[in-house]
Image (tube, rainbow, N blue to C red):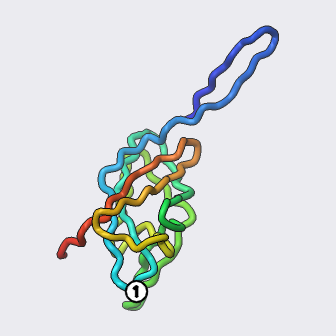
Amino acid sequence: MKKCLRILGGFFWISFAIAAPPPIIVLEHYSYPMSPGQDEGVAYVTLQNTSSHTLTLFQLECDQGEAMIHQTIVQNGIARMEMLSEITLPANGRLTMKPGERHIMIEEPRKPLQIGNNLTITFDFKGYDPLIVMVPVVKRSVQ
């Protein structure tokens, strides 16, 4: 939500907007190491919208490569990924990214993602300051 700050100086009235941090709680955030020969990394987050209105995530940035949100879609037994240009978080709702569903794809990372590394991912929500999240690369759990 934007707040306005007004300064009255002499005969001039100056007004400018100050963006606020998004009303988001990061509940989970992790990435998995890349396999030899793999040229894409992946990250997962769970975000909780703590506000009473819908939020729109419209852009991602990552310090290790180009980041985008993909949705895995299965049709006739064949899985494919579709890039999403925006995602909405419902009021007081949750966005969960996990394997086989929505995820953050890191295209051609500058260096292979290995256990112990961290990614810095910036989430841009319409009308808010960027949300910066440090995402650890962790060992894949057996499922």
Where the C terminus falls, by quadrant? Answer: bottom left
Q: Is residue 82 left or right of residue 75?
A: right
Left or right? Give the position of 130 relative to 79. Answer: right
Along the viewing direction, whichever of 104 and 1 lies nearer the viewer? 104
Q: Nearer the viewer, residue 122 or 25?
A: 122
Percent of width and height locating residue 57: 52, 54
Q: In the rendered view, would you say 133 is above or below 96? A: above
Q: Please determine whether, in this image, residue 105 is positioned above or below residue 124.
A: below
Identify the residue at horizontal 51%, vertical 67% (top origin): 65
Q: Nearer the viewer, residue 102 or 26?
A: 26
Question: Residue 142: image x %, image y %?
Answer: 18, 75
Could you tell me if residue 68 is visible in this image? no
User: Along the horizontal axis of the image, is 17 left or right of 41?
Assistant: right
121 lies above or below 24 = below
Can you give x and y, in whole percent of width and height, for residue 53 in the image?
48, 42
| Residue type indicated by callout 1 | Gly
Q: Residue at point 35% right, 84% down?
A: 36
Q: Which residue is mark 1?
A: 37
